Image (spheres, rainbow, N blue to C red):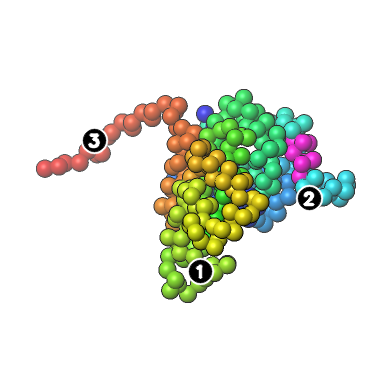
Amino acid sequence: MRYAVLVTGPAGAGKSTFCGALMTHLQTARRTGHLVNLDPAADASSFEYEPAIDIKDLIGLDDVMTELGYGPNGGLVYCFEYLQQNMDWLEEELGGYDDDYLIIDCPGQIELYTHHPFLPMLVRHLNRLGIRTCAAYLIESQFMEDKYKFFSGVLSAMSAMVNLEIPWINVMSKMDLVMSSENDAASGRNGIRTRKDIARFLDPDPMLLVSAPGSREEKTERNSRFHALNQAIVQLIEDHPLVSFMPLDLTNPDSIETVLSHIDYTMQYGEDEEPKEPHDLDEGDFVDME
C-alpha cells in the first residue's frame, strides 16, 4: 500500500518547511519518505530535500508566463490544466515508488483548494492508483491574532475540506514564533503574543466573533451592514463544527511526531501490512536472569 499526504494551505503558511521537517522525522524513524513538488513556481532553493518527483520537470510557471504572457495566477492554472491533460506523466513517475510514503508539497493559491477542480481530480486519480491519500491544511499561528482573520481561515479550511472530500487534519503552524512569556527577549512579527492567546483558537468557538453585549464594538457591529452576514457565519460554524487545529512547533520533535501520528491515523497507515516474522533467536540471544 502506498500513502500520500497533500500538504496544503495559503501562501506563507510554512508548507515547504513542514515537508522538510516531515522528511527528516521519517528518516530519523527509519521510515521511507519521498518529496513530491506540485508547485510549478517553487524555487529549488526552498526545498531542504530534492524532490523525487517535480512538476517543473513537466512544466514551469516561468516558462508559461514568458511564452504565453500569462500572469502568475493564470499561469498557475494553465500549469495544472496542462498536468491534468498529461496525468500519464505523473502516473509513470509514481510507478517507481511502491509501499512508500509520499509527501506532496502543494502551491499556496487558496482557490486551488476551495473551488478549482484540479486537486479533487488529482485525489481521485491517486485513489485509482491505489494510493491512500489524506491532506494537512496549514494556517500560520500569526494569522490567528485577529478574530476576523481567524474565521476567514476557518471558512477557507471548511471550503477546502468539502472540495477535496478526503481524510483531513488542520494544523496551526509556526507555533515556535509565539512567545510563551511576555518577558521573552524576542517579539512576534506584529507584537508579543502568548501561547495562551493563540490556544483559544485551536478549537474554534463561534462566539469569538460576537462582541460583548453593550460594548462599543458590539454597537458598531450591530449597526454595520455586515452584521447579518457575520451572524450567519457564526451560526454556520456553530452548526457544523468541522474545524479544529493541531499546534505545530517545528523546534519540538514531539510536536512533529504528534502531527505525523495523526496523519498516520487519519489515513490508516500500516493497517494493511502483514506482521513481520520474529527473527530466530540463537542460544547467545537468551539472557540468564538468575
* Mark 2 to mark 3 CA distance (whole Å): 67 Å
- Labelled pair 1, 3 in contact (Cβ < 8 Å): no
How far apart in space, not on screen, are marks 1 and 3 (Cα)?
A: 62 Å
Residues at circles 2 and 3 in contact by the CB criterion of under 8 Å: no
Q: Which residues are magenta?
A: 76-83
Q: How many numbered markers are drawn?
A: 3
Q: Which residue is mark 1?
A: 192
Q: Is residue 196 left or right of residue 20?
A: left
Q: Amino acid at mark 2?
A: Pro
Nearer the observer, 162 or 34? 162
Q: Residue 121, image x and y in percent?
A: 67, 31
* First in residue order: circle 1 vs circle 2: 2
Q: Which mark is residue 72?
A: 2
Circle 2 — which element?
helix
Q: Which residue is mark 3?
A: 283
Res. 271 visible in picture: yes
Q: Is residue 26 visible?
A: no
Residue 229: mark: none
Residue at 67% x, 57% y: name it. Answer: 45
Q: Is residue 189 magenta?
A: no
* x 57%, y 30%: residue: 131
Sequence-first tag of 2 and 3: 2
Residue placed most toward the observer, 186 or 15: 186
Tell me which corner region of the image, top left, top right, bottom left or bottom right, holds residue 184. bottom left
Callout 1 secondary element: loop
Rendering coords of residue 225 (x, y %): 66, 51
- The image shows residue 249 at horizontal and vertical percentages of 48, 56
Task: Answer above or below: position of 191 versus 44.
Answer: below
Q: Earlier in the sequence, mark 1 or mark 3?
A: 1
Nearer to us of marks 2 and 3 is: 2
Q: Looking at the magenta stretch, what is its main secondary structure? A: helix
